[in-house]
Structures are given as structure tokens and as C-alpha cells.
Amino acid sequence: MKTPILTVTFSLLLAVVARADLKWEQNTVELHPSSGDKQAIAHFKYQNTGTTPVHFKSVKASCGCTTTQSQKEMVNPGEKGEIVATFNIGDRTGQQVKTVTVQTDDPTNATTILTLKANITPSLEIRPMFVFWTSGEAPKPKKISIKAAKEFPAKEITIKSNNQNFESKLEPGKPGEWTLEVTPKDTSHPMGTALVLQTDYPKDAPKSFYVNAQITQAQPPPLLRAPNQMNVPARAATPAAIPSPATH
């Protein structure tokens, strides 16, 4: 009778002692890439603090703009390693949040979500980014202010448009500052264009920015609008206008 009891006790002891335990140094990494950086790279470090190996089943990024790389497929007890997540910045600005889902055979923590936060300062501050005229409005120029960030040493900007109805003129101001004037030749009917602003920095991959210009449909005169299109509350129906309830 003692043998089964000893076997069960020994099995329970092994289950307690033999365990996998992958500990992460941090699950979230926040980065502040400079304006000239093409990538933001996060290092997620880990260690197997358990007594059995941990195997990686999969490591998947939340989008195609982020790639991942793991140093090894199996982590022995006591071993350390890291997963590297690389975010391709492109033309993105502001805070970008990307995640990496890690699947392992760790029974106590099979799924881990790693988060990469990249705070990207706009290389150019463009105000406003959209100018418009209503149909029939006088085709007067409208101004756009452009200012380069301190760490973005752009000296020249070129402008391209796919619509010849809009003329653009760039006037330099202080170093790293410009004023863009956009003027439509004709405002008789709705149309629009995207002005492409291309800088001379970085030299190997100059960045492009976009400003929208549009001629919108003119609104009808107030007297011709429906009541719900005007900022006038609808009138309550008079008693005479309310139909009598039907009798059954």
C-alpha cells in the first residue's frame, strides 16, 4: 500500500519543482525617434527563471510595418534572450502603438503581449493642412505656414501638383520656415488637388508631405434651404395641423 502513495507524492513533487517560467524585463517599450530616423527599434528582454526549457511557438507583429526577430526557439533554465521589434516609420507622425503577440509552451503564461510605443515628432509643422474656396468665391490666395522641427535640417522645399488650376508660390522666411501661397485660377466649379511638398532631407530618402486644396460646392441661400438645414428649431405643430385619432 505504501508504493502507490510514494509514487503519487513523488509525482506531485516533480510537478511543483519542474516548471517553466519566462520573465520579461518589461512588456512595454516607449521610444522617441528623431525626425531623420527611418526605424524605431524596441528590445524586449526575458529570462527563463524556471527549471524546464521554454519553447517559442510563434512571434507575430500586429501590422506589416513592424517586423520581429527572436534570438532562439528554445530558452533553457537560467538563459536570457530578447525579442527585437522593428517599426518602419515611413511618413507616420504622432504616437504609434504596435504590439507583438508571443506564444510559448509556458503553462502558466502561454501568451504575452509586448507593446512598442513610438512618439514621432512631425518633421514639418504645416498650418493649415487644408485650404478651400467655395464655388464662385473670388480666387484670392490663401497662406499656409511651414516650419521645420529643430532636428530636421531641411533647407529647401519643392512643390508639385497634379492640377494645373491651382498655382503655388513658396516664400522663405527665417531658416527652416516658409510661407506657401495657394491660388486657384478658377472657382466656377468644385475641384481639388493634393500639393506634394518634398524636402531636401534626408539626402538618401527625402521626405514628402501633403497639403490639400479644394473648391467646394457653394451652399444655397438661406431662404432656399429646408428648415432642418438651417440653424432654426422646427416649429411645433398647431392643434389644427394635428390629425384626429382614428376611431376603431
Image: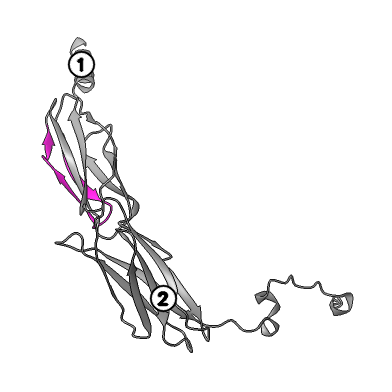
Residue pictured at 47% horizontal, 75% vertical: 132
Disc 2/disc 1 C-alpha distance (Å): 83 Å
- The residue tagged 2 is 213
User: Which scheme is used to colour this image of the protein?
Assistant: one colour
Horizontal placement of 53 versus 34: left or right? Answer: left
Q: Which residues are magenta?
A: 54-75
Q: Position of residue 176 (x, y in %)?
A: 30, 59
On screen, residue 146 above or below 24: below
Number of residues whose C-alpha sits closer than 10 Å to that of mark 2, classed few (under 14), some (14–19) or many (20 or more):
many
**Residue 79 shown left or right of residue 170 in the figure:** left
Q: Which residue is mark 1?
A: 4
Chief secondary structure of the magenta portion = strand
Q: Residue at x 20, y 19 (%)?
A: 17
For marks 2 and 1 on the same chain, the one whose residue lies earlier in the sequence: 1
Above or below for 163 versus 99:
below
The amino acid type, in three-letter code, at marker 1 is Pro
Which corner quadrant holds the N terminus? Answer: top left
In which quadrant of the rendered view does residue 208 lie? Answer: bottom left
Picture coordinates of residue 21 (x, y %)?
A: 22, 28
Label 1 secondary element: helix
State the residue lying farthest toward the top: 2
The crowd level at tag 1 (other Cα within 10 Å; few <14, some 14-19, many 20+) is: few
From the viewer's side, name the closer residue of 216 and 169: 169
Q: Quadrant of the C terminus?
A: bottom right
Would residue 150 be found to the left or right of residue 43 on screen?
right
Q: Secondary structure at mark 2?
A: strand
Residue nearer the viewer, 37 or 125: 125
| Residue type of the residue flagged with mark 2 | Ala
Is 234 in the magenta?
no
